[in-house]
Image: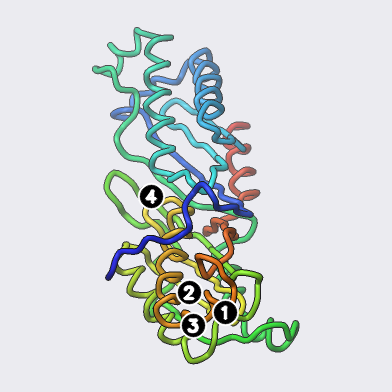
C-alpha cells in the first residue's frame, strides 16, 4: 500500500464526538491496600487531579479495597491505553508519596497490577449502532430521499467484536462509530467507484489492524463501525480512513479535486462515538450501586 501525504491532521480536524470508556484495574496481587477510608478518599482526590490535568473528564468513579473502576470521557486524540497508563502511573506515585507505608504491605513501590479492562460505552449500545448503519439504504433512499446507498461491507462474524477480547495486559470491548462527508456535503461518491472504495477501505483496515464490523458508503457520506485496539485513538481511525481514501479518490476520480479546488476529498470534520454492550447511563448507575454497597 502506497504511503500518502494528505491534508488531514489533528491540527485542522474538528469533531462532534461522544467518547466514553469504562476502565478498571486492581491493586498488585489483589492486596487490599485501599481498605482504609482515608486512602480511598485520598485516591479519589488524586485520580480527580490526574484526570483534570490530562483533560480527562471523570463521569463516575468507584473505589473498593482492591479495585478502581472509572467512567471517563476522553477527547478524540486520546487512546484509552495511554489514558490508563497516565492514570495508573501518576495515581501510584502520588499514593506512595502520601502513604509510604503501603510499600511494605504490597512488597514493592508499585500499587497496580499490569492488567486492566476497557469497555467503550455511549448513549446507545452496539446493537443500535449496527442496526442504524444497516438501515442507511432504507433511511436515506426511502424515508429521507436525500442520498443513495452505494455499497457496504459486513464482517462475517460481527458478534465476535461485541464482547471483551484479549489483548496484551488487557481485555477490551472497544468499538467506534465514525462518519465523514465529502467537501460541501455533496453527493460526490459515484456508483462506479463505490465497490472499489469498499475494497480499498478493507485493505487499509487489514493493514492497520482495524476490524471493520460494518461499513456503509452513500453518495454524500460514509459510516464506519469498527473495533479498535486499546492503543488506537478514535482520531487515528478517522485520519487513517480519510487520508488514505482521499489519496485513493485523487488517483481514481481526480476531476472532483479540480472542480472543488481543494486539497482533499473529505470535509475537515467528522462524527465519532464509542459504543458497547452497555450504555453510559447503565455503567454510571452500576458504579453508583457499588459505591452505595
- Mark 1 vs 2: CB contact within 8 A: yes
Residue 259: image location, x then y, percent = 58, 77
**One can see residue 159 in this view:** no
What is the image's colouring?
A: rainbow
Q: Residues within 10 Å of mark 1 (few under 14, many from 20)?
A: some
**One can see residue 83 in this view:** yes
Pointer 1 residue:
134
Choose the circle earlier in sequence order: 1 or 3.
Answer: 1
| Cα–Cα gap, marks 1 and 2 | 8 Å
| Cα–Cα gap, marks 2 and 3 | 7 Å
Q: Residues within 10 Å of mark 4 (few under 14, many from 20)?
A: many
Label drawn at residue 230: 4
Vertical position of residue 242 compared to residue 257: above or below: above
Mark in front: 2 vs 3: 3
Vertical position of residue 180 compared to residue 64: above or below: below
Instruction: Give the residue at the far bottom of this rendering.
Output: 192
Choose the circle earlier in sequence order: 1 or 4.
Answer: 1
| Cα–Cα gap, marks 1 and 4 | 26 Å
Q: In the picture, which quadrant includes the N terminus? A: bottom left
Q: Secondary structure at mark 2?
A: strand
Mark in front: 3 vs 4: 3
| Cα–Cα gap, marks 3 and 4 | 26 Å
Q: Residue at x 37, y 75 (%)?
A: 202
- Mark 1 vs 4: CB contact within 8 A: no
Q: Residues within 10 Å of mark 3 (few under 14, many from 20)?
A: many
Q: Secondary structure at mark 4?
A: loop
Pointer 2 residue:
214
Amino acid at each position: 500500500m502506497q504511503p500518502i501525504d494528505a491534508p488531514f491532521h489533528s491540527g485542522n480536524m474538528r469533531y462532534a464526538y461522544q467518547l466514553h470508556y469504562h476502565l478498571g484495574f486492581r491493586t498488585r496481587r489483589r492486596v487490599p491496600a485501599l481498605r482504609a477510608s482515608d486512602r480511598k478518599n485520598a485516591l479519589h482526590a488524586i485520580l480527580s487531579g490526574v484526570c483534570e490535568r490530562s483533560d480527562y473528564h471523570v463521569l463516575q468513579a468507584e473505589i473498593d479495597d482492591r479495585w478502581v473502576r472509572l467512567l471517563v470521557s476522553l477527547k478524540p486524540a486520546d487512546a484509552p491505553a495511554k489514558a490508563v497508563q497516565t492514570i495508573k502511573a501518576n495515581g501510584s506515585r502520588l499514593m506512595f508519596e502520601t502513604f509510604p507505608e503501603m510499600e511494605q504491605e504490597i512488597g514493592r513501590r508499585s500499587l497496580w497490577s499490569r492488567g486492566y479492562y476497557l469497555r467503550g460505552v455511549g448513549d446507545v449500545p452496539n446493537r443500535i449502532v449496527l442496526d442504524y448503519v444497516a438501515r442507511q439504504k432504507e433511511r436515506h433512499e426511502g424515508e429521507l430521499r436525500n442520498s443513495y446507498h452505494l455499497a457496504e461491507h459486513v464482517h462475517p462474524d460481527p458478534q465476535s467484536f461485541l464482547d471483551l477480547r484479549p489483548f496484551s495486559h488487557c481485555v477490551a470491548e472497544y468499538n467506534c462509530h465514525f462518519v465523514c462527508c465529502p467537501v460541501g456535503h455533496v453527493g460526490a461518491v459515484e456508483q462506479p467507484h463505490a465497490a472499489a472504495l469498499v475494497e480499498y477501505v478493507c485493505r487499509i483496515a487489514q493493514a492497520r489492524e482495524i476490524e471493520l464490523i460494518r461499513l456503509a458508503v452513500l453518495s454524500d457520506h460514509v459510516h464506519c463501525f469498527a473495533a479498535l485496539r486499546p492503543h488506537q485513538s478514535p482520531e487515528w481511525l478517522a485520519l487513517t480512513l480519510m487520508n488514505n481514501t482521499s489519496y485513493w479518490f485523487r488517483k481514481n476520480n481526480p476531476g472532483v479535486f479540480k472542480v472543488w479546488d481543494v486539497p482533499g476529498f473529505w470535509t475537515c470534520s467528522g462524527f465519532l462515538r464509542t459504543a458497547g454492550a452497555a450504555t453510559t447511563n447503565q455503567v454510571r448507575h452500576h458504579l453508583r450501586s457499588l459505591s452505595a454497597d
